Image (spheres, rainbow, N blue to C red):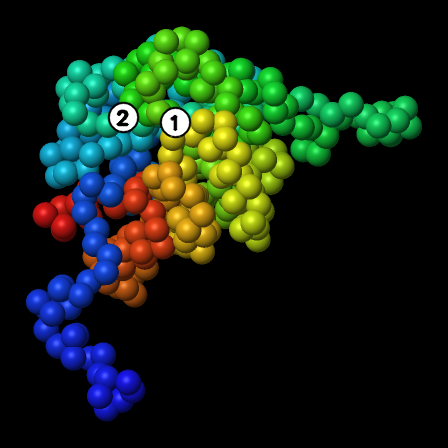
Amino acid sequence: MAFPVTRLRRLRRSEPLRSMVCETRLTPENFVYPMFVCPGEGVRKEVRSMPGVFNLSVDEAVKEAREAHSVGVPAVILFGLPEAKDEVATGAWATDGIVQQAARAIKKETPDLILMGDVCLCEYMSHGHCGIVRAKAPQSLGAAVAAPPAAATDYEIVNDATLELLARTSVSLIRAGVDIVAPSDMMDGRVGAIRKALDEAGFSNAPILSYAAKFASGFYGPFREAADSAPQFGDRRSYQMDPANVREAMREIELDIEEGADMIMVKPAMPYLDVIAAARERFDLPLAAYQVSGEYAMIEAAARNNWIDRERVMMESLVSIRRAGARIILTYFAKDAAKLLG
Ligand SMILES: [Zn+2]
């Protein structure tokens, strides 16, 4: 039945009609609010490239978490800026690590808030990579003589040794009061290694939200300022995924599920809505998507120039991620969007 019998505009005539046929709804329950915890007291330092996002000392993080919870955001995810960095990411798994401290303090103050702990090593490594770095052995005597190992080119990220640190970090976070661990490193086999370590430590009830399909993205730029985690040499393309690959993303997700992931994530969100939709179609686990720092920064920057309507674009970007199939959205807009949704 075509025009003039069919007129799709009939159901768009008024707000109540539009609302009645609305297919995708956002609620504050969809959101997870990322927070960056740093040493000190009373610290609330705005991230230059992410207006409205702060490095927070533990006391300030407690307040921020309470505020997020009070507007209906059910969960926060914690990232840490340690006092010191080294070659084995001690700050990630230390009992008194910055995220561990924050987790204990927030849990005490806001016990009903779900605490997620990002599990990665880059923020705690002096070189800023997500795993242990080893200089590559020269392939021949000639090569060794001609070119002594230069950090920028002749290194590799050691997969299996890194797993041990990720597992240790996960156990330490759960012990400190984190409810869900979220590995974001993209090493092969990390979910299995973490599951095994948690079970052995008596935490068989602790869920894993796996950053299963995490792409090597330019949209992470502002985060690296926020978390002070930019690699000092090279890039992350030997472990994060090629932005061109959707079938490989399905394989990554499938493997993480086999290894014991309880929830899966696609990151970034808006440039990868097709990946979210494909994952939703194919897998039945709760699906999350991370609206990353660059997505946030672009909207904030354009809004500050009055080039776009901030609230409108914020909500449209979030509803697009939900429509693509993500149930859970990690977003720096969590508090503001939750307030708007009432
Ligand atoms: Zn990392």
Identify the disc placed on residue 235. none
* Dot in front, 1 or 2: 1
Q: Nearer the viewer, residue 165 or 62?
A: 165
Name the element at disc 2: strand
- How many marks do you count on the picture? 2
Q: According to the image, label 2 marks what residue?
A: 115
* Image position of 210 (left or right of 143): left
Q: Residue furthest right?
A: 142
Q: Is residue 297 among the parts visible in the rendering? A: no
- Give the residue at x 22% y 88%: 5
Give the residue type that dot 1 points to: Ile
Residue 19 showing in the rendered view: yes
Q: Nearer the viewer, residue 54 or 22?
A: 22
Q: Give the quadrant of residue 144.
A: top right
Q: Residue at x 50, y 27 (%)?
A: 259
Q: Which image quadrant for residue 198?
A: top left
Label 1 residue near ligand 1, CB within 8 Å:
no
- Does dot 1 land on a helix, a strand or a loop? loop
- Residue at 16% x, 79% y is 10
Percent across and percent down for residue 7 are 22, 83
Residue 39 at what x, y percent from top left?
32, 19
261 is higher (above) or lower (below) than 100: below
Q: Which badge, 1 or 2, is on the more N-terminal residue?
A: 2
The local crowd at label 1, few if under 14, some if 14 to 19, many if 20 or more residues have their Cα within 10 Å, is many
Q: Are marks 1 and 2 in contact (CB under 8 Å)?
A: no
Judge by depth and name the residue closer to the eye, 233 or 17.
Answer: 17
The residue singled out by tag 1 in the image is 208
x, y percent for residue 222: 41, 43
312 relative to 140 in the view: left or right: left
Query: Mark 2 belongs to which amino acid?
Result: Leu
Can you tell which quarter of the image residue 332 is in?
top left
